[in-house]
Image (cartoon, rainbow, N blue to C red):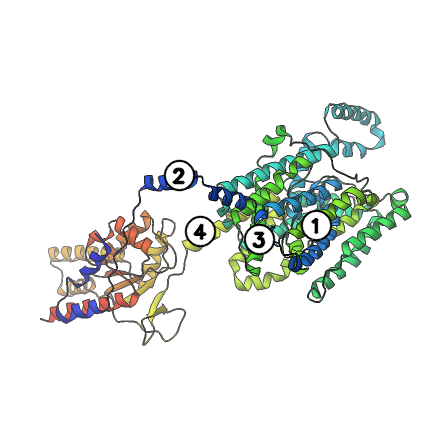
Amino acid sequence: MTETNNIHTVAEGLDGDDAKCSFHHRMFLEPQEKKRSMKALVVKQAKKTCSCTPTKVKDCVFGFFPILQWLPKYKLREDLLGDLMSGLIVGVLLVPQSIAYSLLAGVEPIYGLYTSFFASLIYCVFGTSRHISVSIFGVTCLMMGQVVDREMERAGYDLEPAVLSIPPGAAAHVNTTLSRVNATRQELLCDRSCHAITVAATVTFLAGVYQVAMGFFQVGFVSVYLSDSLLSGFVTGASITVLTSQVKYLLGLDIPRSGGIGSFVVTWINIFQNIHKTNICDLITSFLCFLVLIPAKELNDRFKSKLKAPIPVELVVVVAATLASHFGKLKETYGSSVSGHIPTGFLPPRPPDWTLIPNVALDAIPIAIIGFAITVSLSEMFAKKHGYSVRANQEMYAIGFCNIIPSFFHCFTTSAALAKTLVKESTGCRTQVSGMVTSLVILLVLLVIAPLFYSLQKCVLAVITIVNLRGALQKFKDLPKMWHLSRVDTVIWGVTMAATALINTEIGLLVGVCFSMLCVIFRTQRPEAPLLGWVAESETYESLSAYKNLQTKPGIMVFRFEAPLYYINKECFKSTLYKQTGVNPVWVKAAKKKAAKRMFREREVGSGDNQTSISMDFVSEPLGFHTIVIDCCAVQFLDTAGIHTLKEVCKDYREIDVHVLLAQCNPSVRSSLIRGEFFKEGEDHLLFHSVHQAVDFALGTQGHSGTSASK
């Protein structure tokens, strides 16, 4: 039965003026013929994919390497100055941050410089965004550091710090343990630092492979499940964990880095247990750095519209602190912890350790997802702001290769970073030539300047890391506004933040995704379902509970269900409908049957006329309405349970002489109803393209029935 035929049945029970009136307000829509030959679709797609022409090869190459498109068209006079300025400033800011975030990732400072150099250069070749800065990102560094610490512990490298803290009375045990450790180390191919970067490079390689695979199979839809509130809560929770991990450097404490579930609590317990060992020199240095960096950052933010370039206060602090530490001999005099030797040049390439892949394969998945989600969202945001387009799949390829290729050159994972992207944009960036300039700045540091940072205190790097978390930590100030806008999003933010900070970053992300999906399910399970009233002198119907001065048509109730109708909320649909109309047809039918049985018994025993008349009155008691119009405009889809529920509701109400009409069904719902043989029950099950049409039809039908009855 087609939709057109169903609509024609409107007039079957009417004649004369009633039929003309009803037809005057009806629309006739005939559905399109849809050809759904799977074989034809597969053949067409195969021909399109497998065909090879020079034009297609050229488009494929240029699409895979976007630099071939924009670099030949580069406008030197218009773009070069802005790109040089932004690239230089981002490079200057990136040097101290690269060294600082290396500690967060659990590797030596030189590897942070390697990572920033290769990431900026490779993204220029594969990326489609003109503005984003791909470099080290604090959250992914934290996740990487947790994996590195775990694998270092498995390899036995955690024994050395523990041995050094053993009391002097256990000297014999110490000597025995040290000899075992040394024997183990001799069997290893590299030392502690080498093994740490090997683990990090292997995880980075796998994360890049996952990201390229996501681009190839076009599964970017995964990022849809990472809502803005979820990502914000995750980043804030991870920032709290980052801050916690850096406190020991601020105080100059030599305590083991905690990892795994509950590391946040364990770290703070260790800090308070060892707080009496605080290095006063590191504490004073940290305080002075905070005293300089925080006001300078606030001034940069406040006057960014007036400043041509932000003040590179981090670089100034690093240089000043390095000079003070070197000439003041803070390491030798006060035992302050310093960065140590940072070599110049590049190490020879080395492949990831394939034997580590089974251990870290799962750890690379959340790192890959967070990396591409941040990169794609930032690239789309800045592309929209500046009026150009980016390709999400190509962005996944780009960030994937920014991880795969550098993993062979002793690097760890990267992604787009919001703070550096904002600096890049505000200083005049026009194209990714600015990324090349940033790479040249870092290259200069790698080849010449790196050894000069030997005396740089680790507490200074910790201060730089913490100050750069300001943006994420300031989200707490936005909670009242977020609560006012959406309480559900605020709860999602809070749950994700708490799980990430208190449990674990990976588990926190999983908890956030699951909780966010549960919120969506719960919102569709208990949706709004109001009765509607007519807006005078219009064809509009709105919620009676939301607006005043709405009118109702006599004998007609209009009900709107504001969610898909499927197996989860089918009982809610029925119970809400029964509650709003005040009539449960099942109970009415049961009461009628019970009253009829009672009448039958009373007749058999010869009861009085009074009781019989009361029973008859109860059976024939009017309901107060004769038609229910269900407004389906907010019902996106139906499943088999939803179709069965609609059939059941219509059948139950029809048995107590109440008609149920459906209005404003979208094509998907109409198609589901037709496939579910919804219209075979009878001609009462009609589709209407508006609530007003359904109400007019109900009034006309009732008037016609009343006229026929009077005749």
| Proximity of marks 1 and 4: CB atoms separated by less than 8 Å | no
Pointer 3 local density, CA inside 10 Å: few below 14, some 14–19, many at least 20 = many
Distance from label 2 to label 1 (Cα)?
A: 43 Å
Identify the mark nearer the N-term, 2 or 3. Answer: 2
Residue at left offset 39%, top offset 39%: 47
- Work out whether residue 329 or residue 59 is closer to the camera in this orientation and state it: 59
Identify the mark nearer the N-term, 1 or 3. Answer: 3
Q: Which residue is mark 2?
A: 46
Q: For residue 521, which numbered disc appears in the image?
A: 4
Q: Amino acid at mark 4?
A: Ile
Q: Which residue is mark 3?
A: 379
Q: Quadrant of the C terminus?
A: bottom left
Residue at left offset 23%, top offset 56%: 589
Q: Quadrant of residue 10?
A: bottom left
- Work out whether residue 549 or residue 72 is closer to the camera in this orientation and state it: 72
- The answer to whether residue 703 is above or below residue 456 is below
| Element assignment for label 1 | helix
